[in-house]
Image: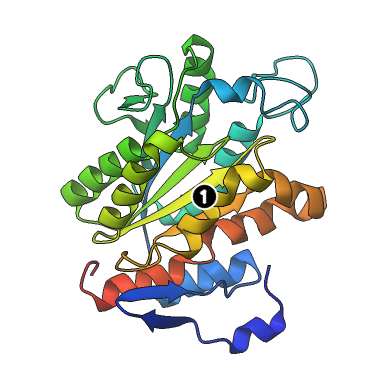
Amino acid sequence: MGNKSSKTKKKGNKRNDFYTIQDNFETVEEVQDELRKSGMEMCDLIIGIDYTQSNTWNGKNTYYGRNLHFLDSDMGMGMNPYQHVIQTIGKTLAAFDADQKIPVFGFGDNVSRGHSIFSLNPQDTVNGICHTFNDVIDKYNRMTPLIKLGGPTNFAPIIRKSIEIVTKEKSFHILIIIADGEVSRTSKQETINAIIEASYYPLSIIMIGVGDGGGDNFETMKKFDDELPQRKFDNFQFVNYEEMKKIISPEYFEARFALCSLMEVPEQYKYLQKKGLVD
């Protein structure tokens, strides 16, 4: 996180045609205020959820040895990491999503694998629309036990589906990808190409890393966050959920986590306004 001195930093700088955005904000309220000051009274959300096989072992240290998608009914373990991320982001962004229609897709199961995505709403298999974050949690809880995990991990299909949605809706969207590891080697270049393509659209991508896969397992995500100069703007933010849990006390966690996830959005939105990609 930043300190008070970070307030004096220049918020963005040009490197060729790549608009690098600094991490500027220190509280969720600052982020929300800046979003409103930048003219963003509302945004639309898209959620992508990782159903690859690695979820079965990446909870060994961080989720009582359980599958990261394990749903606790009466064992007193509380929410799993995916539920907690959805709830936390929902508390922060629900106020900005006017219609509360949230497309939710899974990827990496034994059917879609690394080449496609699937809807978590069985009543809307094409658009994946859930109504409110409570509905997102409900559909996740209902569908997850029926899904067989697979792989490999590829973010390109969910990013390209988001581009399709943004093009159709003609409004600013935030794509939240929740995953337990980075993309596979065979999918890396395809994902890079999709991120670069997405930078031509009013789309912010926030990748939340969950489970034991911290450290080296997320190095590529950090590079996606800080590098890829071919992009038109810095459209990718990586947040390590488990690393934050280690250093932040529970009473402050949700606010600080939301802050890390959203701190780049105001500058992204200003850039998109400047380029005429949003009203």
Which residue, given by chain and number where applicable, does mark 1 sit on? Answer: 220
| Residue 160 seen in the current view | yes
**Most foreground residue, 222 or 248:** 222
Query: Residue placed at 39% from the left, 33% from the top?
Result: 104
Query: Residue placed at 37% from the left, 67% from the top?
Result: 229
Residue 210 to residue 277: above or below: above
**Most foreground residue, 93 or 162:** 162
Relative to 209, 121 lies left or right: left
Query: Residue placed at 70% from the left, 15% from the top?
Result: 73
Residue 36 image position (x, y, % from top left): 44, 71
Residue 239 image position (x, y, % from top left): 59, 52
Residue 102 image position (x, y, % from top left): 37, 39
What number of labels is visible?
A: 1
Q: Residue furthest bottom?
A: 8
Quarter of the picture holding the C terminus: bottom left
**Element type where label 1 sits in the image:** helix
Q: Residue furthest left?
A: 168
Residue type, mark 1 in image: Thr
| Residue 88 seen in the current view | no
Residue 38 image position (x, y, % from top left): 40, 76
User: In which quadrant of the rendered view does residue 176 lie?
Assistant: top left
**Most foreground residue, 99 or 69:** 69
Relative to 249, 147 lies left or right: left
Residue 22 to residue 100: above or below: below
Residue 74 to residue 92: above or below: above
Quarter of the picture holding the N terminus: bottom right
Question: Circle 1: is it few (<14), some (14-19), or many (20+) Cα within 10 Å?
Answer: some
Q: Residue furthest front?
A: 185
Query: What colour-coding does the image apply?
Result: rainbow
